[in-house]
Amino acid sequence: MRKVLPYRIFRRGSYVVPFLFCAVVFFGSIFALFPYIIVDIGYLARPIWDKETIIFPEEIVHYYAEGMSMEARCEAHGWKARNATLTEAGTPATRTPLVYDAVIFSVELDMLEIRMRETWDVVDKFLIVESNGTFTGLPKDTTFADNRKRFAFAESKIVYKFVPLYPLTGKDTAWDNEGRMRWAMQDHIMDSGVQDGDVVTFSDVDEVISKKTLELFKYCEGTPDSVHMHLNNYIYSYEYPNRDRSWRSSVNRWKRGESRYNHGQNSKFILSDAGWHCSFCFRTIDEFRFKMLAYSHADRVRTKKLLETESIQKAICDGTDLWGMFPEAFTFKELLTRLGGIPKSTTAVGLPLWVLENRDRFRYLLPGGCQRGDSLLSASS
Ligand SMILES: *[C@@H]1O[C@H](CO)[C@@H](O)[C@H](O)[C@H]1NC(C)=O
Ligand SMILES: *[C@@H]1O[C@H](CO)[C@@H](O)[C@H](O)[C@H]1NC(C)=O
């Protein structure tokens, strides 16, 4: 029998078979060469298929300048200083609310320390919940409990709760475990003696709400019951301001039976310039590796090479994506400006005071400190 050579098919007048053949070869090679092209195209085309859906109709302008009195600050926001109304005895007419900083702790010791030092004067209780399992059900150290000595300075205000998590079974997902931790925090807040009108923060460890922001909620009357915090957003360190809006954290006036600890949108209000959100701001390369694998996007680790020290170090110093992915953006204009990494900031004005007072220890968080060397491995307290 004679072989039918490919060109013969053309001669017989049918273009369908050769066309399909070529298409299969073409797309087959593309996928073989760039197995993640669909994901990449998805990212590049994001401005077409995705829109930013979180909207805050009430953007509160934040008024603050050094030396501005508390009265003036309250008034600038349309609120009233608690001290303005005094009883006949000369004491404030209303009770000054207590401020509860409620945080679910994972491993970020430095961030917790910076947070506690920053807000020390205004926070009355630090409520900390910690587990021996990750949201994905893997065992983890109880890092806070193991390092509690380091927080001796704050012991008088710390209220700690351990919550066991178990390996995932049946239909359980990481979301269920995350929910368990949030409910445990809800109980912890209620057990702590919180009263209606007290101020409770809902925020992750790396979402640090500034002292001057919390002062507004403690010392002013007439603030909304729940306000989201528009935090200045950073990645790797305060050297790389990230343009994504950080909005999830919030400050809430507690209302028994109504308030529920959560990390989603629960108010139409957002206050600008309310603090700092530093994502992936780790001291050591090992912590980056750990987080890249434990993170809910572990599937982004396309090749082992991404986990190599040089690759991670390069991404940190270039301000580019750890996974080598295209930036997420909602408009093409933004996408273009974000290609090629985040421009470095050269200012350390307006950062948390504790970081500036301990520049040597927190060198890696400041402009010029992108190298994560061995010398940084030990976190002295
Ligand atoms: C409120 O008044 C008390 C004493 O009357 C004073 O100690 C406190 O500093 C005042 N607070 C503010 C925020 O002005
Ligand atoms: C957490 O601790 C409990 C005991 O308190 C244990 O039963 C459980 O297996 C531990 N979880 C993990 C993920 O190791």
Image (cartoon, grey):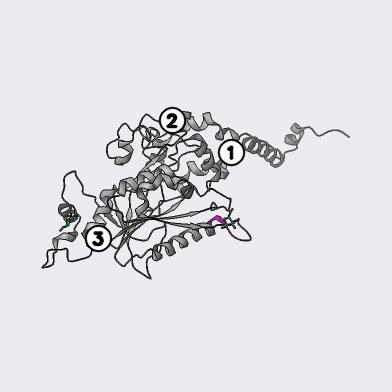
**Residue hosting label 3:** 223
Q: Secondary structure at mark 2?
A: helix
CB of mark 1 near ligand 2 (< 8 Å): no
Q: Point out the stretch of residues depicted in magenta.
A: 169-174
Tell me the CA gap for discs 1 and 3. 47 Å
What's the magenta bit mostly, secondary-structure-wise?
loop
* Whole-percent x, y for residue 167 in the image: 60, 55
Using the image, determine if residue 6 lies above or below residue 131.
Answer: above
* Whole-percent x, y for residue 182 in the image: 46, 59
Q: Which quarter of the image is occupied by the N terminus? A: top right
Tell me the CA gap for discs 2 and 1. 20 Å
Q: Earlier in the sequence, mark 1 or mark 3?
A: 3
**Residue hosting label 2:** 318
Query: Residue shown at 38%/44% (left/top)?
Result: 113
**Residue hosting label 1:** 302
Instruction: Name the residue furthest right.
Output: 1
